Amino acid sequence: MINPGDDLTAKTAGLAICHDCHKLVPATGKQALPSCPRCGAAIHLRKPDSINRTWALVLSSLILSFPANLLPIMEVDFLGTIEASTIMDGIIYFFQEGSYGIGLVILTASILVPCFKIIGLILILLSIRYRWRSWMRHKMLLFRIIEFIGRWSMLDIFVIALLQVLVNFGSLTAISATTAAPYFAGVVLCTMFAAITFDPRLLWDN
Amino acid sequence: MACHGCDLLLESQAVEPGEKLCCPRCGETLKDPQPDSINHTLALTLTGLLLFPFAIFMPIMTLDTMGLENSGNIFDEVITTWFSGYWFIAILLALTTIIFPLAKLALLFLIALNLKLKRYHSSLHLLMRSYVHLDEWGMLEVFMIGILVTIIKMHHMAHIHYDTGLFCFVGLLAATLGSSMMMDKDEFWNLIENGELNGELK
């Protein structure tokens, strides 16, 4: 187990790392600088109000994920009959068709990844709140994965937008986005911003 | 220097291209220098910028079903989504697949060109900061997977012709990914800092 209290950090030395260019800048005492001499970004020891903002964004995405998953996201109009389907319907369709690979890709991108992000961030936030000091490197890895996979949930939105343009044969058949689409995009945006506002260094602080 | 992942204070070390410096406490990558970073970045961003208009405005593919044909490009996609009433989605699409990827390429091209010509304009650090913030909001690679999913979804129902736009898009994606891999942020920031300091002395 790594004990975070033992190591000398930039903060204890009165230094801050610039958020934008990673230059080390004096942040406390007489030489404290309000902005980075190299890139001009504002200097903070830690991202301002990081935990509250991340909580707010994580909870927003949790709330938005209900309409995003329960409302239909796509409508197929075939000879005047309109059939609406939710994200889960689309995935089940692929599994019934026998396209397991593609079904798995969509299941991962649209359902597993958002769940993973929300649960992962809540775990990390709770671990700071209750000072859980074990599994430090794993929590860092978890955060890096959350940061990396954030954008991949946009996949479903891109597919629907593409289908909307390509499958547009007038009265014969057409596909269009419906009510759940903006909520789903909201979930993706909120989780991406949550990862941006979170400062992983808070995990290591005492 | 200090680790931007866990704030551990470290002694600065010189790292050669091909080597990587990681934080001993949290494992964050701290330095990952690239050989000949400026020239490679310049070449790849220029390629990307040349391919850009074709990837956006040329048709990606054509669906052919029961004698009816329909094709679409990325720009149409944004317009169609806008007029179907989902302006929020349309704005998001325009930003993540057109505006941000273009801005990223253009910014990186300008930065690399100025560093190459050793012209240290005082706004260079602002361009660089904009690039750092836009980095993860360009989503061309996600869109590429979106194209693949669409192809697999539609190939039972209609005949698909692949058009010029698709090939230009793949090229654009390769150039964008290559340029962000080749760009050595550390080296770029150091050059900008030294260049601006020297400029002030003159």
Image (cartoon, coloured by chain):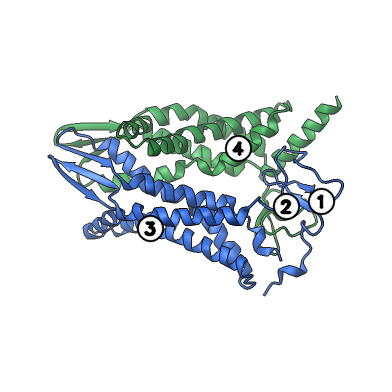
Query: Which chain, by letter, is blue?
Result: A
Residue type beneath disc 3: Ile
Disc 2 residue type (three-letter): Leu
Would you say B19 lies left or right of A193 here? right
- Alpha-carbon neighbours of circle 1 within 10 Å: few (<14), some, or many (≥20)? some
**Mark 1: secondary structure:** loop
The mark lying in front, picked from 4 and 3, is 3
Q: Circle 2 is placed at which residue position?
A: A45
Q: Quadrant of the C terminus of chain A?
A: bottom right
Residue at screen point 53% across, 49% down: A193
Q: Which chain is green?
A: B
Tag 2 near tag 3, CB within 8 Å: no
The N terminus of chain A lies in quadrant: bottom right
Spatial separation of the CA atoms under disc 2 and disc 4: 23 Å
Q: Nearer the viewer, mark 2 or mark 3?
A: 2
Disc 3 chain ID: A
